[in-house]
Image (spheres, rainbow, N blue to C red):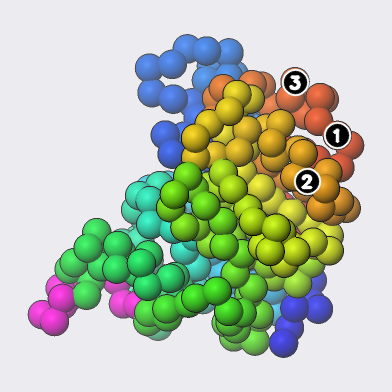
Amino acid sequence: MTNNLPLKVTFLGTGTSIGVPVITCDCPVCVSSDPRDKRNRTSAMLEINGRTFVIDCGPDFRHQMLQNKVMNLDAVIFTHEHRDHIAGLDDIRAFNYVLNKKIDIYGTPEVLEAVRIEFPYIFSESRYFGAPQLTVHPIDDQPFSIMGVEFTPIRVLHEKLPVTGFRIGDFTYITDASFISDEELQKIKGSRVIVLNALRNSKHVSHFSVGEAVDILKKLEPEAAYLTHLSHFVGLHEDVNKKLPDFIQLAYDGLEIFV
């Protein structure tokens, strides 16, 4: 396995399902001139040993690929089936054309079935010529390997919907969670860097609040942690960061870290 090699993580998107700024909203966050307050739908890119993996491809996927000048893609790994995490799948076909290869996608059977329903023309027996070319890989709660890189699934709940987070070596990435069991927390423990969702400051039925995410991260004690899937209700990036514990920061679109 290659998990002992340096891992570069790029936050492609750190916003909630409607992004930031929100259409029609003139709150201080939505009209902020700070680029860190502009948030595409949540997604992350992992680069290790010459391989490029993307976790989730939402409706901003095309823009994210262009903005970050992404020239290669080896696989997309889905956390769950909500549209803000799968809606950009059609734009994978650009990589098919240029790289002349199929792209691997990974997800639980439930997620892959939702993808098939959302994009029937991709999987039709009489496949449309311009449809993305994919190789589909079902996953469960057991570790799996992509091109020599091992991923450990972390099962969490998004209210009642199962969502899969991932640990890759010393790095753990979890989005759209409102509950993590003690058993799954043990899989995360020991990670040097953790990414966790934090929708807003007040409690929410299907997402951790900032306070709840901070409490979990204090228990897990990583060297560094980043909050993602942030709504405009969180507040201005610069103001919020000053109030967080030293080892926790708000992630922002385009942020690059090395693990």
* N-term-proximal mark, 3 vs 2: 2
Q: Nearer the viewer, residue 112 or 208?
A: 208
- Marks 3/2: CA–CA distance: 20 Å
* N-term-proximal mark, 1 vs 2: 2
Compared with residue 45, is residue 99 higher up or lower down, i.e. above or below?
Answer: below
Of tags 1 and 2, the one toward the viewer is: 2
Give the number of the disc on residue 245.
1
Residue occupying the point 59% across, 48% down: 179
Give the number of the disc on residue 174.
none
In the picture of the structure, the residue carrying the numbered disc 3 is: 239
- Local packing at callout 1 (Cα closer than 10 Å; few below 14, some 14-19, many 20+) is few
Question: Where are the magenta residues, as a range?
Answer: 124-134
In the picture of the structure, the residue carrying the numbered disc 2 is: 217
Q: How many marks?
A: 3
Q: Quadrant of the N terminus?
A: bottom right
Q: Nearer the viewer, residue 176 or 27?
A: 176
Q: Are marks 1 and 2 in contact (CB under 8 Å)?
A: yes
